[in-house]
Amino acid sequence: MFDVKDLYQEVIVDHNRNPRNFGKLDPADKTLEGFNPLCGDRLTLYLNMDGEERISEVGFDGHGCAISIASASLMTENVKGKSVPEAEAIFNTFHTLLTDSSAALDLERVGKLAVLAGVRDYPSRVKCATLCWHTLKALLEGGGEPVSTE
Ligand code: ZN
């Protein structure tokens, strides 16, 4: 029988093996490092902006577990070309998906990000999946200090 979980697993494995938008942007308008000490995930996020309103390019590098890399890869695909408010709305949708187990899975809104919904049953992995997103949010809010999930 077809199992949707297998499909989700496949997407995560694929994005971990072949992360999209992996690599440093040079030059980059905005750069910030995110660290998840619980797991050891360490990612750096690079953004180029079209004015202050729109994300024109996004890239990341670093190392981490499969969940953190796949999540960052999926995130870059989702926020590239988006306005700052659109990117923040995607962040909020994704964050709710991972932290509120009663939240309905609105596939039309979350799209491929739904593959990470299974992580919400494993609180320690939620930090892996949300690391890149917290880093993005901090970067859009002005950057500054590296992000730590602890
Ligand atoms: Zn991790």
Image (cartoon, rainbow, N blue to C red):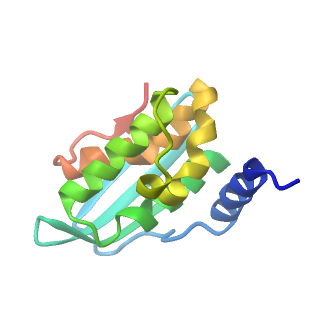
* Spot occupied by residue 26 in the image (x, y as percentages of width and height): 34, 75
Give how far across and how far down residue 78 sits, in percent.
Answer: 41, 63
Q: Is residue 75 left or right of residue 128?
A: left
Q: Is residue 30 left or right of residue 121?
A: left
Q: Say how many tags the image has.
A: 0
Q: Nearer the viewer, residue 69 or 105?
A: 105
Residue that extends furthest to the right in the rendered view of this protein: 1
What residue sits 26% from the left and 44% below the top?
138
Can you give x and y, in whole percent of width and height, for residue 28 in the image?
28, 69
Please report the residue visible at 69 percent of the width from the left and 64 percent of the height from the top: 14
**Above or below: residue 19 compared with residue 106:** below
Query: Can the viewer see residue 92 in this picture?
Result: yes
Q: Is residue 107 above or below residue 14?
A: above
Q: Quadrant of the C terminus?
A: top left
| Residue 63 visible, this angle | no
Residue 85 vs 147, above or below: the answer is below
Q: At x 53% / y 42%, what residue is drawn?
A: 129
Q: Residue at x 29, y 65 (%)?
A: 47
